[in-house]
Amino acid sequence: MAQQLGLNLPGKTALGRHDFLVAPSNALAVALIDSWPHWQAGKLVLTGPPSSGKTHLTHVWASGSHATVIPATDVLDTDVPHLASGPVAVEDVTDVAGDHATETALFHLHNLVLANGHSLLFTGRTTLPAWPLILPDLKSRLQGAAVAELAPPDDSLLSAVLAKQFNDFQIMPKPDVIPYLVGHMDRSFAAARRIVEDLNRESLARKKPITRPMAAQVLDKPL
């Protein structure tokens, strides 16, 4: 059987609902996304570390609700009344925390979206109490939202995430690679993405399939 090498292509991330891997660490967040349009006060705050699935779940919700997805960094330069004419997902609010002008724009967006009878999703990297917001009115509005937290992955979820990342790059590692990675890598989704990208580049450079020894070298760990 021919050995499969990586392809020199950008990873194509699948963002459909059926592509999201459900595990105990994210089951509550998935259930809350799926419970729309019955969100508490019409809004939801989704939190989790980088690459934990926030963007994936955001796009799952946006697909079902026909919402506009916008980075928090773009809100200040956006026509807020026009944006508020439908459901809205604002990603990475923690990136603009402390920026008074942007927080004020987010406050007005929050009020207009809900006043227009639509739903609102905010995402951030840390738990909501840790968001360093400086606008009291915005902080108080968010405290009235339901909160869904994405926790770090367990072994089974991390294995599934690695398999999905390899599939996004259209490559198939040797069967013992993923168990080895799970036992030796940093336990985060961001690390999984980075390692798969590094292994794909290494496979291309060597013109060889991804093996456990290659994984050990990329991780700089002993076999």
Image (cartoon, rainbow, N blue to C red):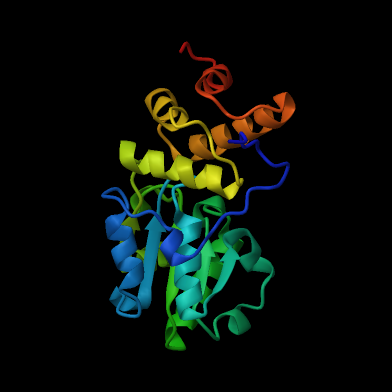
Q: Residue 23 at what x, y percent from top left?
A: 30, 50
Which residue sits at x=62%, y=67%? Answer: 75
Task: State the image quarter where residue 49 is shown.
Answer: top left
Question: Who's the residue at 41% across and 47% down the image?
Answer: 126
Using the rendered image of the protein, determine whether residue 122 is visible from the camera's viewpoint: no
> The N terminus appears in which quarter of the rendering?
top right
User: Where residue 219 sits in the image (x, y, percent)?
Assistant: 53, 21
Numbered marks: total: 0
Residue 77 against residue 194 in the figure, above or below: below
In the image, taking residue 71 as reference, residue 55 lies left or right, namely: left
| Any part of residue 209 in sight | yes
Location of residue 82 with respect to 51 vertically, above or below: below
Residue extending furthest bottom?
Answer: 116
Coordinates of residue 201 in the picture (x, y in percent): 68, 32
Outermost residue toward the top in this view: 222
Q: Position of residue 114 (x, y in %)?
A: 43, 82
Is residue 87 depicted above or below 137 in this figure? below
Give residue 72's quadrant in the image. bottom right
Q: Of residues 136 and 62, which is closer to you in this image?
A: 62
Q: Residue at image x 58%, y 29%? A: 210
Position of 55 relative to 10 (above/below): below
Q: Residue 38 versus residue 59: which sits nearer the camera?
A: 59
Q: Is residue 136 left or right of residue 81?
A: left
